[in-house]
Image (cartoon, helix red, strand yellow):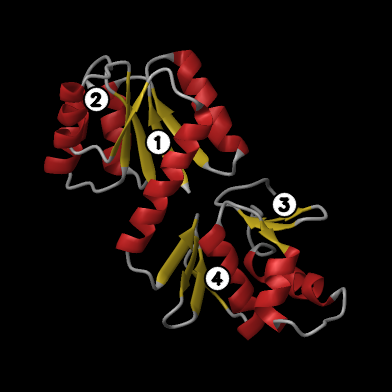
Amino acid sequence: MKILVIEDNVDILKNVTDFLDLRGFTTDCAEDGLTGLHLAATQDFDLIILDLMLPGIDGLTLCQRLRRDAKNRTPIIMLTAKDSIQDKLAGFEAGADDYLVKPFDLSELKARIDVLLKRSWKASDGNVLQVGDLVFDTSTLEVQRAGIPIKLGPIGLKILERMMRASPEVVSKESLSELIWGDEPCESDALRTHVHHLRQCIDKPFKKNTLITVTRIGYRLLAHSHEI
């Protein structure tokens, strides 16, 4: 998931982007309204975190221009120190989806991001899953990465769908085993073998890994990770 943070306070900007990066999101940032508007209008983001008071173009105007002129429907969380009902209404009328008053707790920001992303996911075409450059059409069972077709068997497709729907969260080994075999016992290395094969298909031919092992817990799928 890729998030754009538009914030002119350097400390807040760093805290938010560091927090999100550690949780598996990919972040881009802008410290003024003009740069933020350009990035939001020319690149694809899953969510935008937008400060209200910005140099160049303020957050309200930026939001209005994205919604009205660029026809951009990316979910927007507006950040501001203004907490009156009139200020909040102005933000919503400009096109913001949520409103968070400074100072705020980063865990609350994460919770609001999760809600908006889930809502946006359900509103989009539920048949097409995407994490970074990895795309899975569940209606046709076609998988592509960077436009290159990838062939997977039924178990690989099941594992991939579960992980893409959960991304960037960790999926436990137990839940994957239950998904594949139900209550039936399986060999201890069976799941590891299937995940290894999936990794060979979706990661080995490319420059960056997306399928990450979380030791003794499970696996997670990230939009961007370390180079192979």
Mark 1 is surrounded, within 10 Å at the Cα level, by few (under 14), some (14 to 19) or many (20 or more) other residues, namely many
Q: CA distance from mark 2 to mark 4?
A: 36 Å
Q: CA distance from mark 3 to mark 1?
A: 26 Å
- Amino acid beneath label 4: Glu
Q: Quadrant of residue 191?
A: bottom right
Q: CA distance from mark 1 to mark 4?
A: 26 Å
Q: Nearer the viewer, residue 148 or 8?
A: 8
What percent of the width, then of the height, locates residue 228?
Answer: 72, 51
**Label 3 vs 1, first from the N-terminus:** 1
Residue 86 falls left or right of residue 228: left
Q: Report the residue marked by disc 3.
A: 228
Q: Report the residue marked by disc 4.
A: 161
Residue 189 falls left or right of residue 46: right
Checking the image for residue 179, the label placed there is none
Query: Given contact means CB atoms under 8 Å apart, are the residues at marks 1 and 4 in contact?
Result: no
- Amino acid beneath label 1: Leu
Checking the image for residue 4, the label placed there is 1
What percent of the width, then of the height, locates residue 71?
Answer: 17, 47
